Image (cartoon, grey):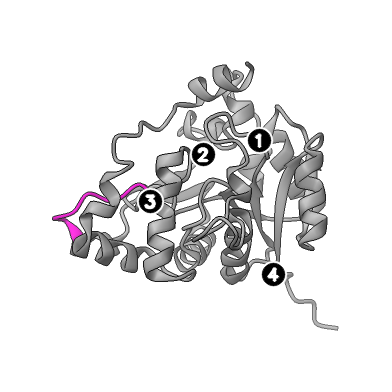
């Protein structure tokens, strides 16, 4: 009998919750209009195109609204710790027996599935602990993490490591081989500032709705950059928004 090696298993895990402190309920916001498909549903459908073995929403165990919503829309989901997001990911990775995790979030309905798939292929090829593209529009990329690194412990961990899933990896480059790399697609747009395509505020939601109205539901980074060149005024509305640090989020979310 010939034994063949099992293919490493990959899982897209989408971190989401109902009660965001800056824009509550944003994962249910319709795109492009309020009565259209919810933001989280767009993210899930995009991530189904990555080609991972599993796509699942990782849900805080007390988020009854999101649990019911996932049931209603027949989405795969996993329940875990509300406050220890990293443990939620660790438990989900173990449950799905994953070797590689694509980390997506409920903030990012414009996440580019093709680039996520490319990131997954690259981390496996180079056998890294973590990989992400660093120069793409905020909200259109993902982090990909090896589960071996995800479950590892590192020196001097603090509360930030509980919320930010990969922080223990980034703080310890002597222990983990991780890479942040520029994507060559952006080399054709050096005259532009990469737009902000995440949804953290009402201004962000306004911009993303404008983009969905113009491009439809299935655009990628190239289409967004072309739109930014044609109609730059669309993206001025949220360029003043400052992305919060991990510490800022912890302070706000405990109120």
Disc on res. 152: 1
* Residue 64 falls in image quadrant: top right
Q: Main secondary structure of the magenta part?
A: loop
Q: Gap in Å between the C-alphas at discs 3 and 2?
A: 37 Å
- For the point 38% across and 58% down, the residue is 210
Q: Gap in Å between the C-alphas at discs 3 and 1?
A: 38 Å
For the record, the magenta segment spans: 189-196
Please say if the residues under marks 1 and 2 sit with CB atoms less than 8 Å apart.
yes
Q: Gap in Å between the C-alphas at discs 3 and 4?
A: 40 Å
**Mark nearer the viewer, 3 or 2:** 3
Please say if the residues under marks 3 and 4 sit with CB atoms less than 8 Å apart.
no
**Mark nearer the viewer, 3 or 4:** 3
Q: Considering the numbered disc 3 on the image, is that residue within a helix, a strand or a loop?
A: helix
The location of residue 66, given as percent across then percent down, is: 75, 45
Q: Considering the numbered disc 2 on the image, is that residue within a helix, a strand or a loop?
A: loop
Q: Gap in Å between the C-alphas at discs 1 and 4?
A: 22 Å
Residue 198 visible in the current orientation:
no
Q: Could you tell me which quadrant the C terminus lies in?
A: top right
Q: Sequence-wise, which precedes: disc 1 or disc 4?
A: 4
């Amino acid at each position: 009998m010939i034994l063949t090696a099992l293919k490493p298993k990959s899982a897209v895990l989408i971190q989401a919750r109902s009660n965001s402190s800056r824009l509550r309920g944003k994962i249910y916001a319709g795109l492009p209009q309020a009565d259209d498909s919810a933001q989280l549903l767009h993210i899930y459908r995009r991530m189904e195109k990555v080609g991972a073995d599993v796509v699942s929403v990782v849900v805080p165990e007390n988020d009854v609204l999101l649990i019911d919503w996932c049931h209603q829309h027949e989405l795969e989901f996993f329940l875990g710790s509300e406050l220890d997001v990293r443990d939620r990911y660790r438990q989900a990775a173990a449950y799905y027996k994953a070797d590689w995790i694509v980390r997506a979030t409920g903030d990012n309905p414009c996440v580019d599935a093709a680039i996520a798939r490319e990131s997954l292929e690259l981390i496996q090829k180079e056998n890294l602990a973590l990989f992400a593209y660093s120069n793409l529009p905020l909200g259109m990329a993902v982090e990909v993490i090896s589960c071996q690194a995800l479950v590892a412990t590192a020196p001097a961990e603090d509360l930030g490591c509980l919320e930010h899933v990969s922080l223990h990896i980034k703080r310890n480059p002597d222990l983990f081989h991780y890479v942040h790399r520029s994507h060559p697609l952006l080399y054709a747009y050096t005259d532009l500032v990469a737009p902000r395509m995440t949804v953290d505020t009402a201004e962000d939601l306004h911009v993303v709705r404008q983009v969905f109205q113009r491009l439809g539901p299935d655009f990628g980074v190239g289409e967004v950059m072309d739109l930014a060149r044609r109609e730059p005024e669309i993206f001025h509305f949220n360029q003043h928004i400052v992305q919060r640090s991990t510490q800022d989020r912890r302070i706000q979310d405990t109120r």
